[in-house]
Amino acid sequence: MAPDSARGPRSTIPHLGITGWIACLAACVLSLSGDSPLWAQLNNRVPREVEQVTVDQKLGESIPLDIPLIDSRGQATKTGHYFDGKRPVLLTLNYSDCPMLCNVQLNALVETLNRLDLRLGRDFQMLTVSIDPKESTERVNQTKARYVQQLTEQPGAESAWHFCTARETAIHRLADSVGFRYTYDAPSGEYFHAAMLAFISPDGVISRYSLDVAFPPEQTKLALMDASNGTIGTRFDQFMMLCFTYDPERGSYVVAAWRLMRLAAAITVTVLLFTLLPYWLGRKRAASIRATKTSGSSASPDVDWGGHSAV
């Protein structure tokens, strides 16, 4: 298990559903209605429906690779099928009948992927698992088709973005492994959940999270490169990675000042070496030539014009 300090903050953008939003609105109204201790107590309470709606970042932990799934063609498979040891995987937990948040999240993700210069299928894979155990294969296949059709700049999306369903026990096991906490509201038939995108290494280790409905392309690229352990991206991309570090508190990459200073110092030393090296080598060569001439002059005897030694 990763230490608590490595887990980072919880997501604060849950999908509440209609019932949840009504509960929150009621709490806000109550908070404006009087100054008695009773109102203060009500104001400090979190709606029961969303108490467990969080994402606990489990950075450095591994997801089980033996969780049974059913793909969009109705074929039985496992989570390990989507981890080939070469490409990182983007994991999302959604469901097709979500009235709002899932659509917003996946539409934003599609927009980012269309602007990303990394290639889906070549550089990374994606896995979306429905949190609704009642969702049919036909329904999840329709959802896949809708989003894949929008990925006009990612020709490998059809074979590299995998949509799956699973039994409830399997869903809970997968959700627990990535710290995804959600609840089911029976009256509305909706799931209260947060927005989450997990970046997982080719061998199943959780590397990074995005806990927002927006995915800036540059942040997404950095997270993918990080999850790949440096196996994707150009040499320049790998060089730029040295300037950034992941901040779990913000859930994003930030410029690492200490890395920039070390990098600047290294560049300065390198430039000085390349600049001064020819000068040092030239001086050394000139000194060697002078020493050779001096040694040769002192070793040769004086001779006269007739070729006889003057000694």
Image (spheres, rainbow, N blue to C red):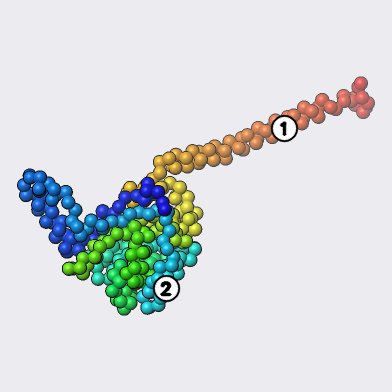
Q: Could you say whether the residue bearing mark 2 is in a helix, strand or loop?
A: strand
Residue 197 versus residue 75 in the image, above or below: above
Q: Which residue is drawn at the image coordinates 40% and 41% (left, top)?
A: 257
Q: Nearer the viewer, residue 40 or 201?
A: 40
User: Which disc number belongs to residue 185?
Assistant: none
Badge 2: few (under 14), some or many (20 or more) residues near its Cα, within 10 Å?
some
Tell me: 252 left or right of 230: left
Residue 288's disc number: 1
Q: Which residue is mark 2?
A: 77
> Depth-wise, is mark 1 or mark 2 nearer the camera?
2
Residue 120 against residue 57 in the figure, above or below: below
- The residue at 30%/52% (across/down) is 10
Task: Kindly identify the amino acid type of the residue bearing the numbered disc 2.
Answer: Thr
Residue located 16% across and 63% down the image: 19
Screen quadrant of the C terminus: top right
The image quarter containing residue 61 is bottom left
